[in-house]
Amino acid sequence: MVPELVRRLGVELGKSVVFQESNSETRVDVKESVRGQTIFIIQTIPRDVNTAIMELLVMAYALKTSCAKNIIGVIPYFPYSKQCKMRKRGSIVCKLLASMLAKAGLTHIITMDLHQKEIQGFFSFPVDNLRASPFLIQYIQEEIPDYRNAIIVAKSPAAAKRAQSYAERLRLGLAVIHGEAQCSESDMADGRHSPPCVRNTTGHTGLELPSGKQQAPFPGIELPIMMAKEKPPITVVGDVGGRIAIIVDDIIDDVGDFVAAAEILKERGAYKIYIMATHGLLSADAPRLIEESAIDEVVVTNTVPHEVQKLQCPKIKTVDVSMILAEAIRRIHNGESMAYLFRNIAVDD
């Protein structure tokens, strides 16, 4: 990503050194004056996420203390974006990271396809959330033969809005897979069953006191019994028989859900299956699982480095989105409007 941005902008990288000392502490040395200048820090998150975050924080703070005028972070994939909601007794780590970046000195962020649009509200400074959908749609139109016979698929009801946006712009049908187990979104994860609901079999709604007496219930109040959710059998809403199935999402990391969705679509008659995602994290043994699955092709952008995964699995293809990031940098530097980069972009992309 970085070489492409530098080439498109026609500039040279600033002179700085980032390294880890023998005790694993991150150190940053800025080798030129940045006083009164607007600085762009490009951080494409590699495999070691926490080290990358620390490098970004230390670099931003080094530029802040060197009197840089504006410090703008170019972070195509924003880490910890899935931890943007309260889960049981956990924490909203994404908001913590936003506060840390602001404290370190960042004044602006350029990113792409945040996991939830509401994440922008965590920041106390401007956030430009660019979209990769135009590039992925162009890939579908140019690289998938007979794409007019395709159908856009959401692998869960939660992804239906994004899939609908793709389907409307491509003038294609829409299908939704319903009933797939989503552990990260389950009730057990968000604490709705903590403490567990206890049904009083005697029919009395009062509270038992240590002395054996019962406290009278609140007058006129009877709490409803919390019914546990049950996942229905997996079904596909929409006809995929004899069609090309294109599953769209923002992140593909643990590919188990995608592999299961591909098998279901094959059973329903889809003869080719594509996965379209912005951020190809592809952790652990994801390349091997993709290679052994019914998936024909996985298309991701270069927001996250994935050269090793491509060598392990020839089904993984890359779409270059450095063009829009470079244009965003140029427009911010020149004080131009960013509206051009959001033309014909749907809210649900």
Image (cartoon, rainbow, N blue to C red):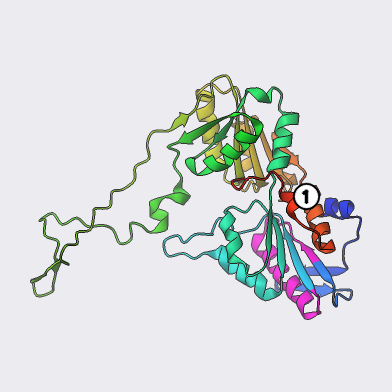
Q: Is residue 101 visible?
A: yes
In the rendered image, the vertical position of residue 349 relative to residue 54, given as above or below: above
Position of residue 109 measured from the top left corner of the image (x, y, whole percent): 71, 63
Q: Residue at coordinates 49% horizontally, 59% vertically from top-left? A: 85
Helix, strand, or loop for circle 1?
helix
Q: How many marks?
A: 1
Per the image, the residue denoted by label 1 is 324
Front-most of residues 91 and 281: 91
Position of residue 132 measured from the top left corner of the image (x, y, whole percent): 70, 45
Front-most of residues 200 and 71: 71
In the rendered image, the vertical position of residue 107 relative to residue 269, given as above or below: below
Magenta-drawn stretch contains 58? yes
Check disc 1: other Cα within 10 Å, few if <14, some if 14-19, many if 20+: some
Position of residue 91 measured from the top left corner of the image (x, y, whole percent): 49, 65
**Image quadrant in which you'd find residue 208:** bottom left
**Image quadrant in which you'd find residue 209:** bottom left
Question: In the visual, does 318 lie left or right of 330?
Answer: left
Position of residue 77 measured from the top left corner of the image (x, y, whole percent): 67, 54
Residue positioned most to the top? 242
Q: Is residue 313 visible?
A: no
> Considering the image in quadrants, where does the C terminus appear?
top right
Q: Residue at coordinates 81% horizontally, 59% vertically from top-left? A: 336
User: Which amino acid type is shown beneath numbered disc 1?
Assistant: Ile
**Image quadrant in which you'd find residue 67:** bottom right
Magenta-drawn stretch contains 101? no
Q: Residue at coordinates 76% horizontally, 50% vertically from top-left? A: 340
Which residues lie in the magenta part? 40-69
In the rendered image, the vertical position of residue 207 relative to residue 339, given as above or below: below
Front-most of residues 39 and 201: 39
Front-most of residues 110 and 50: 110
